[in-house]
């Protein structure tokens, strides 16, 4: 499989990850916060995001450089830590289970949040400056960050905006809607990518 095909399919993984993440919002509204349905969609989304996020750096690696790699790595680590926390809550029985406590849990939550939030904020700025993705992509990332601070119980709508940002970025990669000259070197021919 060529690198271009890998990039294309990682874009599809981002789309699927975003859809799964968006599914957390209706699941929490229908079945409640930390319900089996919400935790299941969240777990699927975290796993897919941990795998697919690297493509968001790959398509703009020249423009974002080492800083872009570090920030996407922080986002991936944040997703991996969130996966572990969701799995522990899911395995313990969901909302009714006794929540794990301790120094390791607190450190994991802190690193997960700092990696995700800090990485996303810096990556949003780098993405805007790189001009590889359309301008509406960094706007979706900004909306996602701002949605974290909505004064709504359990912040049920944050997952929707988080997923929407991933669907947007994945769509741009999958359909080759990248706007920079370096990105235009990857073109489609039928179902395959070719370098042009």
Image (cartoon, rainbow, N blue to C red):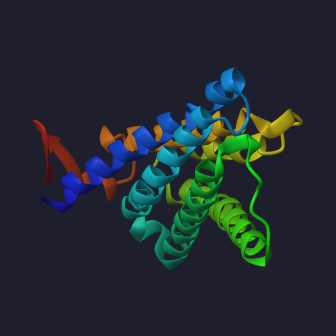
Q: Is residue 133 above or below residue 27?
A: below
Residue 67, image x, y percentages? 55, 75
* Residue in the foreground of this view, choosing between 109 and 126: 109
Q: Residue at 68% x, 21% y: name it.
A: 30
Residue 139, image x, y percentages? 63, 42
Is residue 136 visible in the rendered structure shown here?
no
Q: Is residue 89 left or right of residue 171?
A: right
Image quarter of the N terminus:
bottom left
Q: How many numbered marks does the figure carry?
A: 0
Q: Is residue 179 left or right of residue 20?
A: left
Q: Is residue 118 above or below residue 141?
A: below
Residue 59, image x, y percentages? 37, 58
Occupied quadrant, residue 84: bottom right
The residue sitting at the top extreme is 30
Is residue 119 visible in the rendered structure shown here?
yes
Q: Is residue 29 above or below residue 58?
A: above
* Residue in the foreground of this view, choosing between 166 and 90: 90
Q: Residue at 44% x, 57% y: name it.
A: 56
Occupied quadrant, residue 37: top right
The residue sitting at the right extreme is 151
Q: Is residue 45 left or right of residue 115?
A: left
Residue 101, image x, y percentages? 79, 67
Image quarter of the C terminus:
bottom left
């Amino acid at each position: 499989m060529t690198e271009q095909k890998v990039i294309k399919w990682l874009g599809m993984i981002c789309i699927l990850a975003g859809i799964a993440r968006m599914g957390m919002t209706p699941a929490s509204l229908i079945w409640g916060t930390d319900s089996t349905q919400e935790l299941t969609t969240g777990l699927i989304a975290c796993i897919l995001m941990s795998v697919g996020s690297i493509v968001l750096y790959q398509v703009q690696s020249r423009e974002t450089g080492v800083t872009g790699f570090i920030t996407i790595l922080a986002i991936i680590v944040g997703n991996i830590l969130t996966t572990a926390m969701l799995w522990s809550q899911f395995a313990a029985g969901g909302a009714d289970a006794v929540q794990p406590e301790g120094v390791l849990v607190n450190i994991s939550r802190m690193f997960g949040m700092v990696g995700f939030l800090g990485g996303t904020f810096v990556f949003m700025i780098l993405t805007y400056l790189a001009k590889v993705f359309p301008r509406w992509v960094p706007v979706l990332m900004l909306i996602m960050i701002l949605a974290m601070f909505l004064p709504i119980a359990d912040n049920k709508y944050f997952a929707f905006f988080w997923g929407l940002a991933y669907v947007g970025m994945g769509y741009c990669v999958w359909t080759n809607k990248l706007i920079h000259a370096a990105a235009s070197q990857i073109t489609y021919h039928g179902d395959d990518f070719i370098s042009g």
